[in-house]
Image: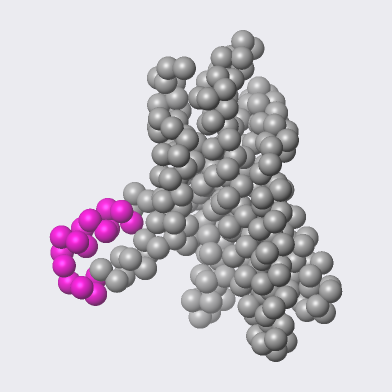
Amino acid sequence: MRETWVVAWNVFRQLLRNRILAVLTLFAFVMVGVICFLGDLGQEAELRLARDFGLLGIEIVGFLTVLLCHVVLLFEETGLKTYGILLVRPVERWQVLAGRTLGAILLALMNEFGMLALLALLAWWRGLAIVDGELVVGAAYLALGVALFSPIAAFFGVLASSVPVAATFAGFVYVLGHFTTNLLEWVQRMGNPGLQAVVKGMYYLAPNFSVFNLKEGLEQTQSVPGWGVFLWPWGYALAYGGVVFLFALWRYERKDF
């Protein structure tokens, strides 16, 4: 386990030296600019939309961080042939894959914490109570969804033969995972059994990232929410992420470099 954390820490430091943070910082400031323009709508509307855009920005920044991290790592592994240098040391393949996954999660958490700090600074400047306990909890569960996306991106990085293919499939699955619930509800209204079976299969196979939208889940709960509302996303992330990581590891052990 120590070797895994060493690999994760080195992957984290390696990713910090790339241009990923510059792109994401620019995106974060664009999001802040959008929130500032919302001030023309009035204070109450500005507060509500600022929180929604803030959570959206936190989720998108986390998604882009994880995707770019695995794209950079895959390019260095296949294009620059750095994998053979890493295996000169006594490191197992599963430790390398786990370290890459954890390293991307660490960088995503750092960027999302930076977005929260930026929102807090914006709230102080605008005189709005944007960052409160509800937003922090919602952002934490969105970060859990981003952490689930890391083994998924690693899986496609192992499975795909090129960087564009891995990035395309990982991004498609991430987007699909946000709309499978709505897509299933829409298809059920059509009354087509064959199409319902196909969409239901997609619903169970694709990751359901709407589980981590705790804000929406709490709004749909009329009474005081039980512990299941908070514990279910953790169980889902651990179970789904663990299965995907095992599949990625199975393929990684048989991959030729």
What is the magenta segment's predominant secondary structure?
helix
Q: Position of residue 10 (x, y in %)?
A: 70, 28
- Location of residue 150 with respect to 220 vertically, above or below: above
Q: Residue at x 84, y 74 (%)?
A: 125
> Which of the pair 232/256 is nearer the observer?
256
Work out whether residue 31 can be spotted: yes
Residue 188 figure quarter: bottom left
Q: Is residue 220 above or below residue 166?
A: below
Pinpoint residue 184: horizontal percent, then vertical percent: 30, 65
Residue at (29%, 71%) from the top-left corner? 186
Residue 193 falls inside the magenta stretch: yes
Name the foreground residue: 140 vs 45.
45
Furthest toward the bottom, the residue is 42
Report the number of discs: 0
Percent coordinates x, y for residue 249 in the rendering: 45, 28
Specify whether 128 is left or right of 248. right
Whether 148 is drawn above or below 231: the answer is above
Q: Position of residue 140 (x, y in %)?
A: 64, 58
Q: Which residues make up the magenta segment? A: 188-203
Colouring used for the render? one colour
Q: Is residue 207 visible?
A: no
Residue 181 picture quarter: bottom left
Q: Residue 195 in magenta? A: yes
Q: Nearer the viewer, residue 128 or 5?
A: 128
Residue depicted at x 41% and y 50%: 173
Q: Quadrant of the N terminus?
A: top right
- Residue beneath the point at 47% across and 62% down: 210
